[in-house]
Amino acid sequence: MIIAERKPMEEIKQVTAPYKKLLLAGCGTCVTVCWAGGEKEVGILASQLRLARGTEGKDHAILEATVERQCEKEMAEELRSKVAEVDAVLSLACGIGVQTMAEIFEDKPIFPALNTTFLGMPEKEGVWVEMCGACGDCFLDRTGSVCPIVRCAKGLLNGPCGGTRKGGKCEIDPQKDCAWVLIHRRLIKQGRLYLMEKYYPPKNFRAVKRPGKIQAIKA
């Protein structure tokens, strides 16, 4: 899941200040689940902006709309008639949704209302843990499916670092588990601890070609 959080209100007010008519566009999938950009959050932000602009005596109009996924052009197209009515769009989607909207509606400024933070797994209600750095060269086959790139504070491919705290906690952040302790325990259970005895050379991050483009092949 893509995790995002709302930008500070002052930043949103500043970037949208020159525009009288705004569309607040929500996205109904990932950022809805993490309470950053669904229909409810669109309504809350719209109310806050109306109040702020009303207090300042500014003439304004704020429209609201939410589509299921802004990252899909067909769904973003559903906003075309509303986009035509406004001077700018404030997107409550991840960075992909914002850029998709910008490609479709090139003549309109599309501003992000969210900061996209990471790819995460839900741990409990309202809490997500970063699990994948989308590095394009997956290492999980050697680590019992625990990613050391993002779950080790130092991103080590050959761990642990030697600073692991008592109880298997991270040297950098004692609130978090040491990824290499998790890897060690997992590999023992699987009878594959020999994988930790190998040396892995520095990761070639150039394996990731930017910008990425993948065409899925059907089985």
Image (cartoon, rainbow, N blue to C red):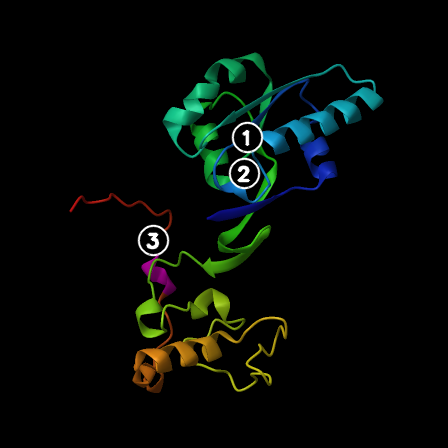
Mark 3 surroundings within 10 Å by alpha-carbon count, few (fewer than 14), some (14 through 19), many (20 or more) = few
Determine the secondary structure under disc 1.
strand
Magenta stretch bounds: 205-209
Q: CA distance from mark 1 to mark 3?
A: 30 Å
Answer whether residue 144 is magenta in the image. Answer: no
Helix, strand or loop for the magenta stretch, by majority: helix
- Could you say which is closer to the camera, residue 25 or residue 185? 185
Answer whether residue 207 is magenta in the image. Answer: yes
Q: Which residue is mark 2?
A: 32
How far across and how far down the image is residue 38, in percent? 56, 34
**Residue at 18% from the left image edge and 43% from the top image edge:** 218
Compared to residue 122, the image places residue 190 above or below, namely below
Examine the rendering and report whether any part of residue 194 can be seen. yes
Q: Are marks 1 and 2 in contact (CB under 8 Å)?
A: yes
Q: Which residue is mark 1?
A: 26
Mark 2 surroundings within 10 Å by alpha-carbon count, few (fewer than 14), some (14 through 19), many (20 or more) = many
Q: CA distance from mark 1 to mark 2?
A: 8 Å
Residue type marked 3: Lys
Name the mark on residue 209. 3
**Residue at 48% from the left image edge and 74% from the top image edge:** 179
Q: Nearer the viewer, mark 1 or mark 3?
A: 1
Residue type marked 2: Thr
Q: CA distance from mark 2 to mark 3?
A: 30 Å
Of the two numbered discs 1 and 2 on the same chain, state the one appearing first in sequence: 1
**Residue at 68% from the left image edge and 30% from the top image edge:** 44
